[in-house]
Amino acid sequence: MSIETAETTATTSPKAVGAIDLRSDTVTRPTPAMRAAMAAAEVGDDVYGEDPTVNRLEQRAAEIFEREAAVFVPTGTMGNQVAIRLHTQHGQEVICEARSHVVEWEMAMISAFSGCMPRTIVGTRGVLTWKQIQAAIAPGLYYRAQTGLITVENTHNMAGGTVTPLPVLEEIWAGAKDAGLPTHLDGARIFNAATYLHVGVAELTRGFDTVMFCLSKGLCAPVGSMLVGSQKLMHRARIIRKSLGGGMRQVGVLAAAGLTALETMTTRLEEDHRNARLLAESLARIPGLTVDLESVQTNIVRFQLAAGKGAPEFVAKLKRRGILAGSTGPDAIRLVTHHDVDRSQCELAAAQIAEELSQ
């Protein structure tokens, strides 16, 4: 199964009974506390701004990130694309990392919706520096497409969950301010980054004009992401969300799970990181594959088959053993740890991968 499928619908076939599902943290199921909150949620029409549970979720997200306002959106992709549209004009460029989610997994919406062109940069393990970004900013020539926005992804999915450190971000924020350019953070897994760095999310994101983060990955909510920023930007974000079909009605039943996620799930992510490290170190001892242990910083493990090919076939073989993984290239496989997979299951997964390779 490709990583594209894992990042969107999570599966195209019935889930294997008793399978250890390491395809993505999007496969997490809502906790009993979330289900109870959803069942008891007070609701109203959110398009009219009358859903009290959504309003509480947006207020709480804004408080946690120390922003003026927040907007609940159904998906991280919508959150990112709303932000890009907020900050840009048709015919501009958006600076982003070459394998970032906004480039690889958001259906060319930078161009299709915002009328902009990605100006991509290859970062070291997905991390961009201000020096790289500065070199990519378009010169102020009337016959050249101008830079409209700088985007950063933290953690970086396709680089293996790598984290951009705070000092690197501070240089980007300062440089972007001097250049007069807005910045947006794809922080789908920003709580993982904050856990790794032992820094609060408000501190880690304070210099971005807008921040998107997901409730439905490691935080286990069934649906939803948040976009945070100034009151003025979030007012415009609601308009753009509506144009994308994101105006929802009695959606407090979903917002209730998001509130529970914010209050109960962010502090347990270190467990997922430990399990990912366990997996990575176990895999690194197996002949026939390679793992970049330095890139295993959060809850994602990527490894490559020494043969240089065969990842889809190997994923199919693992599925027959009850291990669900995702291929990210001809020879690359991704495993993601999360709430629904414990340490013993990670140990079993590593053992099954070793046994399959030995054959």
Image (cartoon, helix red, strand yellow):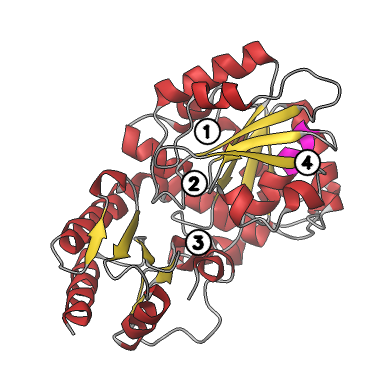
Q: Residue at x 60, y 55 (%)?
A: 104
Q: Tell me how far mark 2 sits from mark 3, CA to CA.
A: 11 Å
Q: Earlier in the sequence, mark 2 or mark 1?
A: 1
The residue type indicated by label 2 comes to Leu
Point out residue 250 in the picture as x, y percentages from the top left corner.
76, 60
Q: Tell me how far mark 4 sits from mark 3, CA to CA.
A: 39 Å
Q: Nearer the viewer, mark 1 or mark 4?
A: 4
Circle 3: element type:
helix
Q: Residue at x 46, y 28 (%)?
A: 204
Residue 64's mark?
A: 1
Q: Nearer the viewer, mark 2 or mark 4?
A: 4
Q: Main secondary structure of the magenta part?
A: helix
| Left or right side of 271 for 300 | right
Is residue 226 among what the camera can see? yes
Q: Nearer the viewer, mark 1 or mark 3?
A: 1
Report if residue 87 lies within the magenta region.
yes
Report if residue 275 lies within the magenta region.
no
The residue type indicated by label 3 comes to Met
Residue 34's mark?
A: 3
Point out residue 145 in the picture as x, y percentages from the top left corner.
79, 30
The residue type indicated by label 1 comes to Ile
Q: Earlier in the sequence, mark 4 or mark 3?
A: 3
Q: Tell me how far mark 1 sits from mark 3, CA to CA.
A: 19 Å
Q: Tell me how far mark 2 sits from mark 1, CA to CA.
A: 9 Å
- Mark 4 highlights which residue? 116
Crowd rating for badge 3 (residues with CA inside 10 Å; few <14, some 14–19, many 20+):
many
Q: Earlier in the sequence, mark 2 or mark 4?
A: 4
Q: 6 or 241, which is in the foreground? A: 6
Residue 262's mark?
A: 2
Is residue 50 among what the camera can see? no
